[in-house]
Image: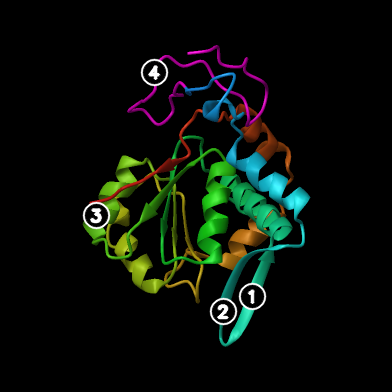
Amino acid sequence: MDDIPEPANGPDQILPASYFKTWEADKPVTLYLKREGPCSTKPISIHTMVKERAINYPNQIALAVKRDGAWKYWTYKEYFDESRIVAKAFIRLGLEIFHGVCIMGFNSPEWMLLNFGVIFAGGLVAGVYTTNSPEACRHLADNCRAQIVVVEDVECLNKFLAVKRFLPQIKAIIQWSGIPGAPGVLSWAELMAIGMAEKDMELEERLSLQAVNQCCTLIYTS
């Protein structure tokens, strides 16, 4: 295999690694790169990918959803900007790098904004089946070292509330649709307000530590 490019400072760097796979979420892996051919494309981070779309196609529609009979749209610029707002909110709420954020709900623009927000902040996305039992939710949250839980509605919320006493590491719970179903649970508007009040400095510091050969998502399946 040809030499891997030297690491650079920022989310597009490649950290030194010895193996093509790892069982530890905070360990980098070797990338199979060549100087020519299909494996020669320079890898970029998720943040850079979304940022490039926002720069090149700022006003093109990236996300759309029909609610109450009307369509709501996000452009690529809004997609990128709001994902960064979510990331800053997660950092403010105490998310540490390589710790999980459980996301439980059906496909929606909020799911996608949360997904990128977790990754930008250096956390690990951990999607949760809406059919999971409370005990399965507990296992997943414990296994990914989740510090934040985000749910779509009260039905999803109740599954985590049923086992919250066993998850002392959880620092915040957010419900993105409807009125939060329990005291202390943040709404989507409150999450965004937290992020908008934060400066970019800590987020940029988190991004500078990231690398394209690190884990950003954990997938749990049956």
Where's residue 182, x and y in %? 42, 70
Q: Quadrant of residue 13?
A: top right
| Cα distance between the residues tagged 4 and 1 | 44 Å
| Cα distance between the residues tagged 4 and 2 | 45 Å
Viewer-proximal residue among 110 and 66? 66
| Of the two numbered discs 4 and 3 in the rendering, the one whose residue sits closer to the viewer | 4
- Find out whether the residues at labels 4 and 2 contact each other: C-beta distance under 8 Å: no
Identity, as a three-letter code, of the amino acid under mark 4: Tyr
In the rendered image, the residue lying farthest to the bottom is 69
In the rendered image, residue 128 lying in the magenta stretch gets the answer no
* 1 or 3: tag closer to the N-terminus: 1
Identity, as a three-letter code, of the amino acid under mark 2: Lys
- Find out whether the residues at labels 4 and 3 contact each other: C-beta distance under 8 Å: no
**Pointer 1 local density, CA inside 10 Å: few below 14, some 14–19, many at least 20:** few
Q: Which mark is residue 19?
A: 4
Viewer-proximal residue among 58 and 215? 58
Tell me where the magenta segment starts and ends, as one range: 1-30
Q: Which residue sits at x=50%, y=72%?
A: 177
Q: Which mark is residue 82?
A: none
- Find out whether the residues at labels 2 and 3 contact each other: C-beta distance under 8 Å: no
- Find out whether the residues at labels 1 and 2 contact each other: C-beta distance under 8 Å: yes
* 4 or 2: tag closer to the N-terminus: 4
Q: Is residue 197 above or below residue 13?
A: below
* 4 or 1: tag closer to the N-terminus: 4
Q: For the residue labelled by badge 2, is the local secondary structure a helix, a strand or a loop?
A: strand
User: Which residue bears the numbered disc 1?
Assistant: 72
Q: Which mark is residue 66?
A: 2
Residue 165 appears left or right of 37: left
Q: Which mark is residue 136?
A: 3
